[in-house]
Image (tube, grey):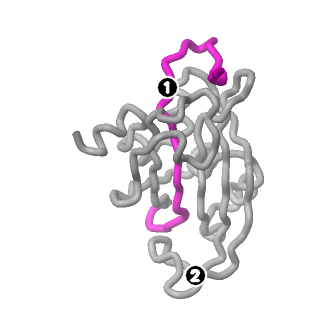
Amino acid sequence: MTARLATADVIDLTACLSIPVAQLLQERLGRPLRGQLADQDVIRRIRAPGLVKLQTTGPVTHRHVILRDSQEPHLPVAVAWALVVVRRLPPSVREGLKSGEPLDRLLTAHGSAWTAEVLPDEYRLTTTEQLSANFPWAAPDTPAAEVTRILSVGARLLAVLIDEVPRLPQLGPAEPLIPLTG
């Protein structure tokens, strides 16, 4: 089985080329997810050759967003990291960076038609214990995917996104994610 096929049960790699990861996870979970801006800072300058895939030496904004279940106890569902070339964003989207929305969902909400390319050498199958956040509803060996994408609007390269996504359990829309006991 290839990594791409094994990843499908965690996240649809083809769909995340043009649909926000948060939207895909909401559809799978059956309810909205809330974004929480965990951290954001600016990297003013990057030594040459810089971020080659984004064709920049800075500045870039580094963002860390946690997607949480909308139901109590609002446990984390996924993590979204981004390195964004802010000067290339539409002005309305720049203002939205202050929110807890992941960049792909923010662009979609502002009507920007974006596309992404999954970097084939930079996505991996892993387990939740290897991710950057604690997912108390998932066992440490729960399958997860770390997906790295280059996001653009037309020919403008905007960001590198890294999404950390554990395999979600099968729940009904009214069933909350609950911490494992034990």
Determine whether, in the image, residue 163 is placed left or right of residue 120: right
Determine whether, in the image, residue 74 is placed left or right of residue 121: right
Kindly identify which residue carries mark 1: 28
* Percent position of residue 139, x then y: 54, 30
Provide the major secondary structure of the magenta segment: loop
Task: Say which of 22 and 120 sits in front.
Answer: 120
Tally the numbered discs: 2
Task: Say which of 35 and 75 sits in front.
Answer: 75
* Percent position of residue 107, x then y: 59, 50
Q: Amino acid at mark 2?
A: Thr
Q: Is residue 117 visible?
A: no
Q: Earlier in the sequence, mark 2 or mark 1?
A: 1
| Numbered mark located on residue 161 in the image | none
* Percent position of residue 129, x then y: 54, 42
Number of residues whose C-alpha sits closer than 10 Å to that of mark 1, classed few (under 14), some (14–19) or many (20 or more): some
**Residue that appears at 64% across and 31% down:** 136
Is residue 159 one of those drawn in magenta? Answer: yes
Q: Is residue 93 visible?
A: yes
**Disc 2 on helix, strand or loop?**
loop
Is residue 123 one of those drawn in magenta? Answer: no
**Residue that appears at 50% across and 51% down:** 113
**Residue that appears at 56% across and 49% down:** 104
**Disc 1 on helix, strand or loop?**
helix
Asked whether disc 2 touches disc 1, contact meaning CB atoms under 8 Å apart, the reply is no
Kindly identify which residue carries mark 2: 57
* Percent position of residue 164, x then y: 53, 46
Residues in magenta? 153-182
Which quarter of the rendering shows the N terminus? top left
Q: Amino acid at mark 1?
A: Arg
